[in-house]
Image (spheres, rainbow, N blue to C red):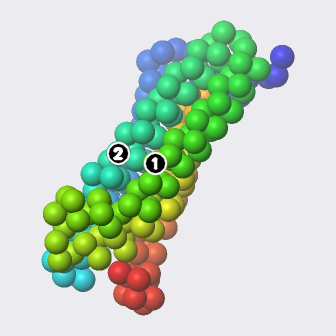
Amino acid sequence: MKEDTKGVKMLRGDPKRAILKLSIPMIVAMSVQTLYNFVDVIWVSGLGPDALSAVGFFLPFFYAMMALSNGIGTGGSSALSRRIGANDPDGADNVANHSIVLCILVAMAFSLPTTLLSEPIFRFLGAGEVTSLAVSYARILFAGSIIVFFTNVANSLLRGEGDTKRAMYAMVLGSLLNIFLDPIFIYTFDMG
């Protein structure tokens, strides 16, 4: 049997200490992610109310992506930690692999129709004059939704293994990149 990782050893130790060690990195990561969403709004608001409205029309779809990917991630994380607790490394690997495959399938099932049908969807939702802006913004994010799905599922699996620090580093890095690259893409490359 493989030697336990540091995260697994921590999971098998004192529950109070484990909860603190697991929760603090995630509090930091989620706080930075919230900051990144706030900064996004600030940068987009510089383009005017229509651009901000277009982003607002996409928001429910973003939350749908988060709900789907976090659901898969939570299920995978729970099953993974149970396998680890049962000293079943092969079962843990199997859970992780199946979680990733399910993540990819659900991401494709979500992104293909939403990318192809984004214009009629936003017209139906009443986007009116901002439909073209909403479609331009959403198509990029719908097409790249696999990244959102994979990131959330992979982070959940890391947390299920007790490795919240690596999950935190990945989330913070992604958020900071977005915060600093937003103005460059929006204003310098005129991709707003």
Where does the image place residue 120, in percent across and percent down from the top left?
30, 63
Q: Secondary structure at mark 1?
A: helix
In the image shown, does 18 or 72 lie closer to the viewer? 72
Which residue occupies 72% across, 27% down? 93
Q: Is residue 189 visible?
A: yes
Query: On the image, which quarter does residue 163 sit in?
Result: top right
Residue that numbered label 1 is attached to: 110
| Placement of 89 over or under 53, stated as above or below | above
Query: On the image, which quarter does residue 24 sit in?
Result: top left
Q: Nearer the viewer, mark 1 or mark 2?
A: 1
Q: How many marks?
A: 2
| Placement of 96 over or under 132, stated as above or below | above
Marks 1 & 2, CB-CB < 8 Å contact: yes
* Image mark for residue 120: none
Where does the image place residue 129, in percent across and percent down from the top left?
17, 77
| Placement of 37 over or under 140, stated as above or below | above
Q: In the rendered view, does 50 fall on the left or right side of 144?
A: left
- In the displayed image of the protein, which residue is found farthest to the right? 1
Q: Secondary structure at mark 2?
A: helix
Residue that numbered label 2 is attached to: 64
Which residue occupies 46% across, 40% down? 69
